[in-house]
């Protein structure tokens, strides 16, 4: 009772795809897993300014890796003057011992409904010494305006520099965590403040999977 599970992992193989797509034997599996972790950590750390909520990886053979970068600011990676993807491919080739890297940038259509980006936006405000209640309220309004059916935000730690750590939680609408058909997005971020680390968790209910897929591919319009 009361145990929590990551909403994405709970739905993988049912309504959500894997974020690493490849096949390996027993000897290769560990090496590939470590490589995937290094690739994700490098991109999320060095290119944080591009608002990247997730990275997906595909492997074709043992020496070719395709990296799909989801970003809310594609212009920061592919601009008229600068193309950072060529530099990124060289950096990832060094991490993976010279493997062929193909990077592809995909734009996040609704950044306000991405839970990871929402957690990072709250994190940014807390690191600037903003009010945690104001930050949560502002994010809730943004999520509501984006068309979500519900959201839950939990911030824990020494809120406002208090001596004792505590938890602040705000819930709006419906967030059915145990419903597999529900498209629940989850995000987590850590705010490193002068008085300690604050943890931020965000859950966003974007509707039923069938409805979101229809809206994505325009199937709803064809039925009408």
Image (spheres, rainbow, N blue to C red):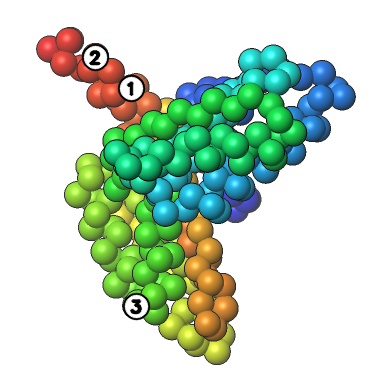
Residue 18 appears anywhere in the view = no
SS under mark 2? helix
- Of the residues under marks 1 and 3, which one precedes in the sequence? 3
Name the residue that disc number 3 marks: 131
**Identity of the residue drawn at 28% across and 58% down:** 140
Q: Which mark is residue 219?
A: 2
Name the quadrant of the C terminus. Answer: top left
Marks 1 and 2, how far apart at CA:
8 Å
Q: Is residue 13 visible?
A: yes
Residue at image coords 65%, 34%: 93
Q: CA distance from mark 3 to mark 2?
A: 43 Å
Q: Residue at x 40, y 49 (%)?
A: 51
Residue drawn where x is 57% and y is 78% of the image: 196
**Residue 121 placement (x, y as % from top left):** 37, 59
Residue 161 at x, y percent in the picture: 48, 86
The residue that disc 1 covers is 213
Query: Where in the figure is residue 28, as x and y percent of width and height?
Result: 81, 25
Secondary structure of the residue carrying tag 1 is helix
Mark 2 nearby-residue class (10 Å; few <14, some 14–19, many ≥20): few
Total residue callouts: 3
Q: Could you say whether the residue bearing mark 3 is in a helix, strand or loop?
A: loop
Q: Which mark is residue 32?
A: none
């Amino acid at each position: 009772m009361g145990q929590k599970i990551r909403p994405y992992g709970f739905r993988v193989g049912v309504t959500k795809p894997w974020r690493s797509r490849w096949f390996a034997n027993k000897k290769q599996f560990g090496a590939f897993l470590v490589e995937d972790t290094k690739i994700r950590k490098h991109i999320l750390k060095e290119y944080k300014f591009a608002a990247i909520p997730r990275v997906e990886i595909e492997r074709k053979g043992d020496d070719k890796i395709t990296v799909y970068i989801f970003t809310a600011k594609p212009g920061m990676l592919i601009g008229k003057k600068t193309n950072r993807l060529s530099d990124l491919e060289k950096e990832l080739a060094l991490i993976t011992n010279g493997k062929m890297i193909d990077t592809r940038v995909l734009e996040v259509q609704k950044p306000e409904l991405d839970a990871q980006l929402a957690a990072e936006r709250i994190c940014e405000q807390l690191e600037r010494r903003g009010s945690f209640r104001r930050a949560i309220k502002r994010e809730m309004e943004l999520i509501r305006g984006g068309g979500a059916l519900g959201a839950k935000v939990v911030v824990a730690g020494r809120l406002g520099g208090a001596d004792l750590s505590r938890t602040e939680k705000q819930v709006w609408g419906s967030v059915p965590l145990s419903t597999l058909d529900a498209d629940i997005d989850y995000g987590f971020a850590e705010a490193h403040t002068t008085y300690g680390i604050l943890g931020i968790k965000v859950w966003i209910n974007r509707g039923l999977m069938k409805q979101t897929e229809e809206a994505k591919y325009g199937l709803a319009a064809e039925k009408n």
